[in-house]
Amino acid sequence: MKISARNVLEGKVQNVTKGAVNAQVTLVLEGGEKIVAIITNSSVDSLGVEEGKRAYAIIKASEVIVGKGVDGMKLSARNVLSGEVTSLLDGAVSSEVGIGLTGGAAVVASITKESVHALGLQAGDQVSAIVKASNVMIGV
């Protein structure tokens, strides 16, 4: 299967915590980064998501927020992944920002060209890719 989401990150399920309707799934990527997803209990069951199983965190580039200097900040977003800007591609309105994560994986963010300039983003800058847990899909 091919999908349009730019970010497909492979990892191992560290834990699954079920609530009344939704479950919290934590994946650990090869480089040690953790990604938290909130999906329905029925999705956990139908996908067979369980501790120790391989799975993928799937994130659309438009759901990734880029932050600079956010280390130590308190945010409601569960996923704050540190990395370095590896590429910048400016379009007329939006820009694509490639971020190499500390552990070796890569994330692509689609943000406005104006935001790239407001942040003064350049290749080599230390940034964070920020994603709400509810914006992370899980695939197996």
Image (cartoon, grey):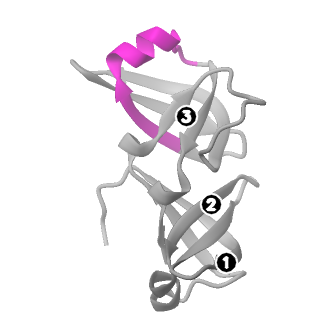
Q: Label 2 sits on what residue type?
A: Val
User: Of marks 2 and 1, which one's residue comes earlier in the chain?
Assistant: 1
- Sequence-earlier tag: 3 or 2: 2
Mark 2 burial class by Cα count in 10 Å: few <14, some 14-19, many 20+: many
Bounds of the magenta span? 107-123
Q: Which amino acid does the dot numbered 3 rest on? A: Ile
Question: Mark 3 Cα within 10 Å, few/some/many (few <14, many 20+)?
Answer: many
Indicate the position of residue 127 as horizontal and vertical percent values.
Answer: 62, 26
Q: Residue at point 46% right, 10% down?
A: 118
Give the residue displayed 65% in from the left and 85% down from the top.
50
Question: Is residue 19 part of the magenta span, yes or no?
Answer: no
Q: How many marks?
A: 3
Q: Label 2 belongs to which residue?
A: 36
| Residue named by callout 1 | 16
Q: Nearer the viewer, mark 1 or mark 3?
A: 1
Alpha carbon separation for disc pair 3 and 2? 18 Å
Mark 3: secondary structure: strand
